[in-house]
Image (tube, rainbow, N blue to C red):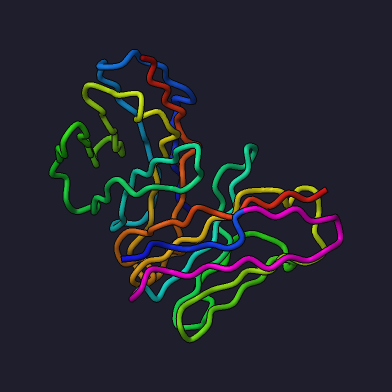
Amino acid sequence: AQKVTQAQTEISVVEKEDVTLDCVYETRDTTYYLFWYKQPPSGELVFLIRRNSFDEQNEISGRYSWNFQKSTSSFNFTITASQVVDSAVYFCALRPISSGSARQLTFGSGTQLTVLP
Amino acid sequence: KAGVTQTPRYLIKTRGQQVTLSCSPISGHRSVSWYQQTPGQGLQFLFEYFSETQRNKGNFPGRFSGRQFSNSRSEMNVSTLELGDSALYLCASSLGVAVGEAFFGQGTRLTVV
């Protein structure tokens, strides 16, 4: 079974501050995907990024960056120079790739990010 | 390219009734998954369909069922509604089972009174 833990329930920052959202996961699968999704008040889960378990290259995309460390089973997400529009609930998720596993998405409990003007 | 479309967006039902929710995936996507989101339990997997066949099922009672049509559109049905079924039901589409990322619709908010 998979488990995704987002220990930060709520984070509040002032606009233009950097903020890092933590994600720790557990899985027995050797190959898997990791994801970050954003859920604004409208309810739709917006896909942000996918990483493969065999690709530990970290990535920067505009104000977003991700730090994947397989050794510590962590997949953290950083927003640089946060903006009010970044306010949302952010979910980390895992999905096994191997055919012998139940391959649904397992989500963390989410982190409510509030960016204050 | 149109996104995932879920209908209706909002629904109010009475205990004991049944409800059917609809999901149209992104064109070309053949896998549709359903998730239930509640404040207490978070996001929980219901089931996944691919090529009109249920490929995976979560830990929900038999009152929750679904199906997929030849055009990949999917419906889920909940019979004998209970107050605890009040939730946001999200549909996700992807190219295939565990292939790439899943894209979600805006959800159907079901309220059972």
Q: Is residue B86 left or right of residue A61?
A: right
In this view, B112 is above or below B47: above
- Note whether A70 is above or below B80 in the view shown: above
| Residue at 78 percent of width and 50 percent of height | B112
Lateral position of residue A18 relative to residue B71, left or right = left
Q: Is residue A55 left or right of residue A3?
A: left
Measuring 38% from the left and 62% from the top, which residue is drawn there?
B3
- B82 vs B80: above or below: above
On-image quarter of the C terminus of chain A: top left
Where residue B60 sits, quadrant-wise, is: bottom right
The residue depicted at 44 percent of the width and 41 percent of the height is A39
Q: At which x and y percent is residue A11?
A: 42, 20
Of the pair B53 and B86, the residue shown nearer to us = B86
Looking at the image, the residue that sits furthest to the bottom is: B70
Q: Horizontal and vertical percent for residue A63? A: 19, 31
> Does residue A60 appear left or right of residue A6 in this picture?
left
On whether residue B14 falls in the magenta region, the answer is yes
Along the viewing direction, whichever of A101 and A86 lies nearer the viewer: A86
- Residue A113 at what x, y percent from top left? 42, 26
Residue B39 lies in the magenta-colored region: no
Q: Residue at x 52, y 81 (%)?
A: B53
Number of numbered discs: 0
x and y percent of residue A50 in the render? 27, 51
Q: Which residues are magenta?
A: B10-28
